Amino acid sequence: MQTHFVFRQMESSNALRGYAEERLEKIKRYFADPLRISCTFSVDKIMHSASFDVTLRNGLQLHASEATENMYSSVDMALAKMERQVRRYKARIKHHKADEGRTAKVKLGVIAAESVTDRHIEEDEAHLPAANNHAATHESAAPPESSPHIIRQSEFHAERMTVHAAIMQMNLLHKQFYVFTNAASGSITIVYALEDGNFGLIEPQPEGQQGQQGQ
């Protein structure tokens, strides 16, 4: 299959393409035929970033990225990171099958930080005379809340899978959390990494059990 390359803030390089393709062969040998491979190279001042995304035919995705002062080092480190996770799960990756059934749609948004803080109120009060400032502080102790400002928004379908598969997918993507459709319950569920090496699980509780918890 063909590998897709993207170059940002830098010129396209056949030498870098060839180097990355050669290193990717170590990843490809674990799979019969990856569905898609994308490589993104970018330069920001002195930092050279290499990012790799691999989509397998069974639906699993792999991701790894690194940034150093040398692009070739970034390529080596990113793909070494990806290979460590692949070797960790190689048997489960090989036998993984996508779960059939309905997937839930999730809306993803980014909220502007200043829209959920009191910074603008503090700035207004800073321009008031000292006496009025003191009075205003008491009068406006509970300012009305305004809707948060959404910078950008997107939607995606949360993949349907088991909790075990979701943890594997989270680690293969090198993420701190992963949102998915729980194959057992059909509900939106979140797994996340804990500092002690364990994993957290957030899932909705059936309505019939909510009242029982307080009894």
Image (cartoon, helix red, strand yellow):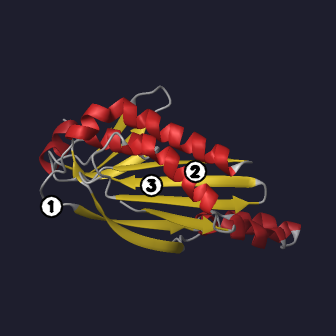
Amino acid identity at mark 2? Tyr
Q: Amino acid at mark 1?
A: Arg
Q: Secondary structure at mark 2?
A: helix
The residue that appears at 70% across and 65% down in the rendered structure is 119
Residue drawn at 21 percent across, 42 percent down: 96
In the rendered image, residue 32, in percent from the top left (x then y), is placed at 27, 46
Sequence-first tag of 1 and 2: 2
The Cα atoms of the two marked residues, 1 and 2, are separated by 41 Å
Residue 27, picture quadrant: top left
In this view, 203 is above or below 136 = above
Question: Which residue is rendered at x = 64% and y = 54% of the image?
Answer: 49
Q: Are marks 3 and 1 in contact (CB under 8 Å)?
A: no
**Looking at this view, is 89 or 190 the one in front?**
89
**Which numbered disc covers residue 53?**
3
Please tell me whether mark 3 or mark 2 is closer to you in this view. 2
- Residue type marked 3: Asp
Q: Which residue is mark 2?
A: 19
Q: In which quadrant of the rendered image does the N terminus lie?
A: bottom left
The alpha-carbon separation of the residues under discs 3 and 1 comes to: 25 Å
Instruction: Give coordinates of residue 179: x percent, y percent.
Output: 34, 52
Q: Position of residue 58 (x, y in %)?
A: 23, 51
Q: To which quarter of the image does residue 191 belong?
A: top left
Of badges 3 and 1, the one in the foreground is: 3
Count residues near mark 3 (Cα–Cα under 10 Å), then give few for <14, some for 14-19, many for 20+. Answer: some
* Secondary structure category for the residue under label 1: loop
Q: Which residue is mark 1?
A: 102
In front of the other: label 1 or label 2?
A: 2
Which residue occupies the foreground of this view, 18 or 48? 18
In primary-sequence order, the first of circles 3 and 2 is: 2
Q: Residues within 10 Å of mark 2 (few under 14, many from 20)?
A: some
